[in-house]
Image (cartoon, helix red, strand yellow):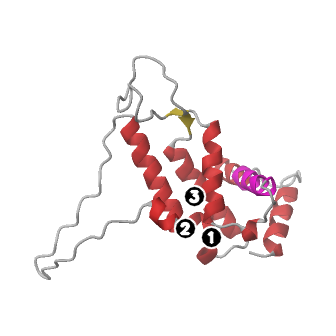
Amino acid sequence: MSAEMQNDSTQASSSSSRPSAAPLSRYESQKRRDWNTFGQYLKNLTPPISVSQCNFNHVLDFLRYLDQFGKTKVHLHGCIFFGQPDPPAPCTCPLRQAWGSLDALIGRLRAAYEEHGGSPETNPFGSGAIRVYLREVKEGQAKARGIPYTKKKKKKRSLITGSHDQVQPSKSFKQLAS
């Protein structure tokens, strides 16, 4: 990413204030808001960093930071309601961002990064570590609510080729981060 990316974001935000500009779609408005929020998050870090310096660790920290504003109850392992889809009473378990919200956010930020001049190869929002984190959030939230997580069905093996390839287990987020 370069100074052009930051200039593009400044120009894009100033062009929206012109009366002749067409109104943005809901998706485009949300994408702009998300991009500005992420940029503000990076500026508030100590020391502040630019978008061009950020990596997947900054994105993961941002996603964890957003949890404090979540509205989805995620029961902890010690909670008596862990694994119950509809608990009969309130509990003190934390509220978190829902997996679907995080997944959509990453999609919008990934697109915004490239629209602001970042290359797909260096896009921190497209990192494998981000995909692993999102998968772990999805599985964890499903378990906490008692909803079975459906695993991908294995592909049928071709009778013609007689393939005996075995699927390797994916690395967890903790393995990728270390």
Which image quarter: residue 5?
A: bottom right
At mark 2, the secondary structure is loop
Marks 2 and 3: CB-CB under 8 Å? no
> Looking at the picture, which amino acid does disc 3 mark?
Gly
Q: Which residue is mark 2?
A: 127
At x 53%, y 52%, the residue is: 103
Q: Is residue 29 above or below residue 51?
A: above
Q: Which residue is mark 3?
A: 107
Q: Is residue 175 magenta?
A: no
Q: Which residues are magenta?
A: 33-44
The CA distance from mark 1 to mark 2 is 7 Å
Q: What label sits on residue 35 in the rendered view?
A: none
> Looking at the picture, which amino acid does disc 2 mark?
Ser
Which image quarter: residue 158?
A: bottom left
Where is residue 60 shown, x and y percent of the image? 60, 56
At x 47%, y 60%, the residue is: 173
Marks 1 and 2: CB-CB under 8 Å? yes
Q: Residue furthest top?
A: 89
The CA distance from mark 2 to mark 3 is 12 Å
Where is residue 174 shown, x and y percent of the image? 47, 60
Where is residue 157 shown, x and y percent of the image? 16, 72
Which image quarter: residue 52?
A: bottom right
Q: Which residue is mark 1?
A: 123
Q: Does residue 130 appear to the left or right of 65 in the view shown?
A: left
User: Crowding at label 2, few (<14), some or many (≥20) Cα neighbours within 10 Å?
Assistant: some
Q: Is residue 54 above or below residue 21?
A: below
